[in-house]
Image (spheres, grey):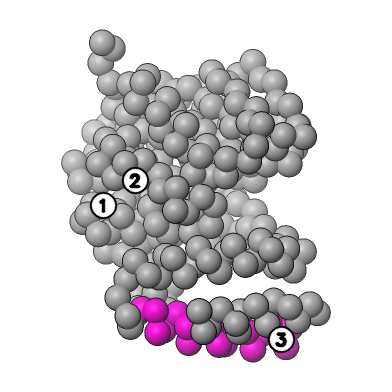
């Protein structure tokens, strides 16, 4: 059996309703990683039956006949990583602009042995319009999310975006891979909650990557049905905690409903949020 290397990683890009010409992650990946000392394989997982993806860069291309969501795509990549003796799994969505600086930093981290044994995730700063959008420290019953500004080893309750999360494969084995209870929304929150509950650590690299946050224009990017699914996932995630967390979550929904009523042209969002308070 081939020995697992500490600097070996499987990289998965999950695509939805886009082709490779419009996939920022794919277009910036190959130029950014080629001169680094990393042992890597790329998996393209296309969740759009209406698109057919072909690539000579990827080790594997999956054109799924149905939308397997994030958890399905990630679990495929997780199994690939195990079968091919990869130490790490790098998650990428289609909208992340990957830089040479990111992979140079990642190569140094993985090749220089600076990670404590309890470190199971490596992440960069993600920014949009020069504002940190990941990672955040969670506090006060999940009500407060504070951007983290200093790199280094992170402990406590941290959350970060899925994209550019490098997750240790052995850690994934201990939690059984990615939860099918969070097929799309809140999967990143669930993952980092697992890291927190198991008292593991995260390494935040001193490097920034641009990321497009699609939910910034909420009404245009999220349909009513999609929003209903998001609320279900939020409720499921909060149920992982005790009653006070749920109480504060419901309180937050009250304020969200009011804001949606005042700001959004489509008042259905506000109505759905209000109804969910009593579920």
Whole-angstrom CA distance, mark 1 to mark 2, is 7 Å
Query: Which residue is painted at 51% across and 50% down in the image?
Result: 183
Against 31, residue 149 (above or below) is below
The overriding secondary structure of the stretch rendered in magenta is helix
Residue 227 at x, y percent in the picture: 64, 66
Query: Which residue is under mark 1?
Result: 201
Taking the image as shown, residue 7 lies to the left or right of residue 77, namely left
Taking the image as shown, residue 273 lies to the left or right of residue 262, namely left
Taking the image as shown, residue 139 lies to the left or right of residue 222, namely left
Q: Secondary structure at mark 2?
A: strand
Q: Which mark is residue 121?
A: 2
Near mark 3 (Cα within 10 A), the count class, few <14, some 14-19 or many ≥20, is: some
The reply to whether callout 2 and callout 3 are in contact (CB within 8 Å) is no
Whole-angstrom CA distance, mark 3 to mark 1, is 40 Å
Residue 3 at x, y percent in the picture: 25, 16
Question: Which quadrant of the figure has residue 47?
Answer: top right
Counting residues from the N terminus, which is met first, the one under dot 2 or under dot 3? 2
Q: Secondary structure at mark 1?
A: strand
Q: Nearer the viewer, residue 166 or 62?
A: 62
Whole-angstrom CA distance, mark 2 to mark 3, is 39 Å
Against 70, residue 151 (above or below) is below
Near mark 1 (Cα within 10 A), the count class, few <14, some 14-19 or many ≥20, is: many
Query: Which residue is painted at 75% across and 81% down in the image?
Result: 267
Q: Which mark is residue 261?
A: 3
Against 247, residue 5 (above or below) is above
Near mark 2 (Cα within 10 A), the count class, few <14, some 14-19 or many ≥20, is: many
Question: Which quadrant of the figure has residue 199?
Answer: bottom left
Question: Which quadrant of the figure has residue 109?
Answer: top left
Q: Secondary structure at mark 3?
A: helix
Counting residues from the N terminus, which is met first, the one under dot 3 or under dot 1? 1
| Magenta-drawn segment | 245-264
The reply to whether callout 1 and callout 2 are in contact (CB within 8 Å) is yes
């Amino acid at each position: 059996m081939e020995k697992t290397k500490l600097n070996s990683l499987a990289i998965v890009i999950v695509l939805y309703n886009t082709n490779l010409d419009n996939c920022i992650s794919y277009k910036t990946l190959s130029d950014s990683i080629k001169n680094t000392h990393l042992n890597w394989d790329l998996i393209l997982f296309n969740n759009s039956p209406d698109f057919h993806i072909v690539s000579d860069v990827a080790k594997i291309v999956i054109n799924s006949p149905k939308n397997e969501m994030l958890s399905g795509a990630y679990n495929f990549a997780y199994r690939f990583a195990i079968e091919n003796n990869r130490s790490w799994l790098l998650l990428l969505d289609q909208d992340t602009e990957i830089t040479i600086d990111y992979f140079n930093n990642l190569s140094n981290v993985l090749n220089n042995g600076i990670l404590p044994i309890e470190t199971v995730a490596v992440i960069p700063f993600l920014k949009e319009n020069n504002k940190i959008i990941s990672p955040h420290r969670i506090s006060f019953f999940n009500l407060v999310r504070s951007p983290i500004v200093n790199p280094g080893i992170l402990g406590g309750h941290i959350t970060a975006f899925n994209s550019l999360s490098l997750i240790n494969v052995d850690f994934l084995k201990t939690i059984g891979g990615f939860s099918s209870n969070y097929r799309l929304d809140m999967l990143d929150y669930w993952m980092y909650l697992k890291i927190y509950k198991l008292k593991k650590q995260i390494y935040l690299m001193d490097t920034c990557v641009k990321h497009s946050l699609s939910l910034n224009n909420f009404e245009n990017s999220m349909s009513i049905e999609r929003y209903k699914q998001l609320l279900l996932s939020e409720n499921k995630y909060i149920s992982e905690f005790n009653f006070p967390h749920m109480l504060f979550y419901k309180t937050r929904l009250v304020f969200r409903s009011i804001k949606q009523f005042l700001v959004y042209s489509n008042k259905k969002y506000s109505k759905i949020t209000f109804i969910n308070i009593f579920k």
